[in-house]
Image (cartoon, rainbow, N blue to C red):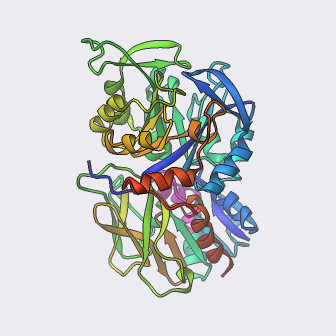
Amino acid sequence: MIGIIDYKAGNARSVQYALTRLGVESQLVSAPSEFEALERIVLPGVGSARATMDFLADSGCGDALDERVRSGDVPFLGICVGLQVLFEHSEEGDVKCLGWLPGQVRRFTGDLRVPQIGWNEVSVRVDDPLFDGWDQRYCYFVNSYHAVSEQPVAATANYGGEFTAAVRAGNITATQFHIEKSGPDGLELLRRWATC
Amino acid sequence: MGDVLTKRLIACFDVIDGRVTKARQFEDNIDVGPADEIARDVYAQGIDEIVFYDILASAQKRAPDIAAVRRVAQETFVPFAVGGGVRSIGDMLDVLDAGAEKVSVDSMAVRDPEIITQGAAAFGRQAVLLSMQVKRREVSPELPSGYEIMIDGARTATGLDAVEWAKRGTGLGAGEICVNSIDCDGTHNGYDLDITKAIAEAVDVPVIASGGAGNVEHLVDAFTTADASAAIISSLLYSPRMERNSSVRELKDGLVAAGVPVRPSP
């Protein structure tokens, strides 16, 4: 069973609808006790880094994630803010994040409309079966902040400069774009992650 | 302002009893079809986004029709905004939990601007779409832009200047502004480029042009002349009042030919 963490600020339901469309069963989870039976975990993201981190700390889901994903080997998918909180620190609300991946989350700067809201072309930067034949696809981004990774990232897009569009590290996968709202191309990537 | 993203085409559903309708200048709504069926159709055509307005909710003092919102969300995997009747953070959460990821506030935000701030704090500013009904007026000290904000289905004048309200709304936390021209709505004569451009220049969030599109040139004008980031194209797609409707693909082909970047059609 895939668990989608529902922190009452976001789009857990959209992710569930997308998985249902793909014929994949899922449930919304919001308490650590529900993590035990999960075979895969999704941390969706709408809302702020601080709201997400506060929820993870207050609910105990952060510890449960740490145990199942970081110490364990449960496949994990972070979406949007769910990607950003994997890094060490976010400028958004000056908040300490999970720190699973080395790097910082920074606001877009320059002569740009912020938030970035729209479909942007994603370039795959790794040789990885998840992205095999999936490149230069247009995906839906909604973000004011972006991760500056200290390690090579899986995919990038361009908004006043190149930024992190997706990361892969062991059992951790995360997309800055809304994989569940990126049309057939997003659904295809979600299907691969959910069934690989 | 630098806007390197593709331009978005948005289908806007004015919903009554779960059915999409089409109005002209905010009146005389005629029936188009069930919202979930139209949603499935425009999604398959490659629409970039859907906005769902429960157009009677506000007047009937009730929350938006969540069951109808859910049916659309289950059929479409593109961004989805919902408005009409949203009065509180609780209503916003219900809408997001039904599968939307943006909430559109309009008349309610004029009456209680605090809802913009509260919504942005709870769900992030990208989740708060400030939709505004604008009407052309004489330029005056009270209305320096020459456009006034109207509410309640364009029936009530507020005395607010459109550009000032857009700036204020953005300052309060709106992540996106939709400029609905009452004068142009349903006319098929083109968007009101003047006010769209004035607002796009005044704010640094994305601006959506709405009301009046009748052909692909109107879209090109909105994206280039007025610097809109997105445009609402409901009549073009499915208004029974148009002699001939267009497909999303035709419109995108026309935009590409005019040099406007779009997400390719499937």
**Vertical side of A138 occupied by B20: above or below:** above
In which quadrant will I find the C terminus of chain B? bottom right
Q: Nearer the viewer, residue A134 or A20?
A: A134
Q: Position of residue B245 (x, y in %)?
A: 61, 41
Horizontal relation, residue B239 to residue B193: left or right: right
Confirm whether the magenta stretch covers residue B147.
no
Q: Residue at x 46, y 42 (%)?
A: B231
Q: Nearer the viewer, residue A17 or A107?
A: A17
Q: Is residue B82 visible?
A: no
Q: Is residue B101 visible?
A: yes
What span is colored magenta in the figure?
A: A44-63
Which image quadrant for residue A95? Answer: bottom left
Q: Position of residue B233 (x, y in %)?
A: 53, 40
Which image quadrant for residue B174? Answer: top left
Horizontal relation, residue B156 to residue B200: left or right: right
Q: Residue at x 50, y 71 (%)?
A: A174
Report the number of numbered marks.
Answer: 0
Which secondary structure is most common in the magenta stretch? Answer: helix
Confirm whether the magenta stretch covers residue A57.
yes
**Vertical side of B129 occupied by B59: above or below:** above
Q: Residue furthest front?
A: B243
Q: Residue at x 55, y 49 (%)?
A: B49
Q: Position of residue B63 (x, y in %)?
A: 66, 29
Q: Residue at x 29, y 22 (%)?
A: B145
**Vertical side of A127 occupied by B245: above or below:** above
Q: Nearer the viewer, residue A58 or B240?
A: B240
Q: Position of residue A138 (x, y in %)?
A: 48, 65
